[in-house]
């Protein structure tokens, strides 16, 4: 959930009409929408297992639960602000470094937990997952733009809110 606006990271099988033409990612206001659920997965070739802790600096992938595509970014311009476009791309067997995000924990915590303030920094572009109150008018009317920006800002902090949380397995 985007800390400042309380909108959820959201996607659906609606492609952008510009930029990459990939599956769009937006901010959505409602709590109980299945298109706002994401699965945290390790990067390709990692030995991480379900339940392992995620420490600050860990690189992860976020898979959209409904469409099975990966949260992705690249150098295409976002539709409203012209920042870095955030999309969903690929699938179970199709993933690349454009899907890699570094978890950066805000505050004193060293492990990502529910309601822990975090930033997600895209590995390839260096952009931070970001949102703002500007909303789409047509296809995703009332939903906020989610984009990437290259600097830390107050409005690129996110929280893990609703979801299924597994017991933590501490690495030895």
Image (cartoon, helix red, strand yellow):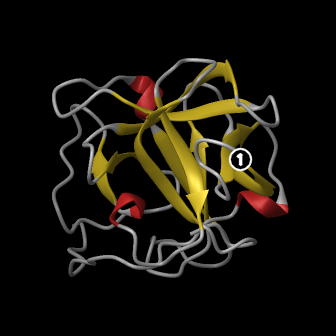
**At numbered mark 1, what does the secondary structure look like: helix, strand or loop?**
loop
Residue 100 x/y as whole percent: 44, 36
Judge whether 142 appears above or below 115 on screen.
Answer: above
Judge whether 102 appears above or below 162 on screen.
Answer: above
Residue 169 x/y as whole percent: 20, 74
Q: Residue at x 18, y 44 (%)?
A: 47
Query: Is residue 163 found left or right of 29 in the rendered image?
Result: left
Q: In this view of the protein, which residue sits in the foreground, 172 or 143?
A: 143
Q: Residue at x 52, y 46 (%)?
A: 102
Question: In the rendered view of the protein, which quadrant contains the N terminus?
Answer: bottom right
Looking at the image, can residue 86 be seen?
yes
Q: Residue at x 55, y 78 (%)?
A: 116
Q: Given the current orientation, which residue lies at the most extreme front position?
A: 138
Residue 25 x/y as whole percent: 53, 44
At label 1, counting other C-alpha atoms closer than 10 Å, the crowd grade (few under 14, some 14-19, many 20 or more) is: some
Question: In the rendered view of the protein, which quadrant contains the C terminus?
Answer: bottom left
Looking at the image, can residue 129 be seen?
no
**Residue beneath label 1, please?**
136
């Amino acid at each position: 959930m985007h800390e400042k606006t309380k909108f959820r990271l959201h996607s659906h099988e609606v492609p952008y009409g510009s930029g990459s033409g990939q599956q769009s990612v937006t901010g959505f206001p409602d709590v109980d929408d299945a298109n706002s659920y994401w699965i945290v997965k390790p990067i390709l070739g990692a030995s991480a297992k379900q339940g392992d802790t995620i420490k600050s600096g860990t690189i992860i992938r976020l898979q959209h639960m409904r469409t099975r595509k990966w949260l992705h970014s690249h150098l295409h311009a976002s539709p409203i602000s012209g920042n870095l476009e955030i999309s969903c791309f690929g699938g179970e067997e199709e993933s690349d470094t454009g899907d890699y995000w570094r978890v950066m924990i805000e505050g004193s915590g060293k492990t990502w937990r529910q309601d822990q303030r975090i930033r997600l920094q895209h590995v390839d572009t260096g952009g931070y997952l970001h949102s703002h109150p500007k909303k789409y008018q047509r296809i995703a009317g009332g939903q906020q733009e989610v984009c990437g920006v290259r600097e830390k800002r107050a409005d690129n902090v996110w929280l893990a809110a609703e979801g299924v949380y597994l017991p933590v397995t501490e690495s030895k």
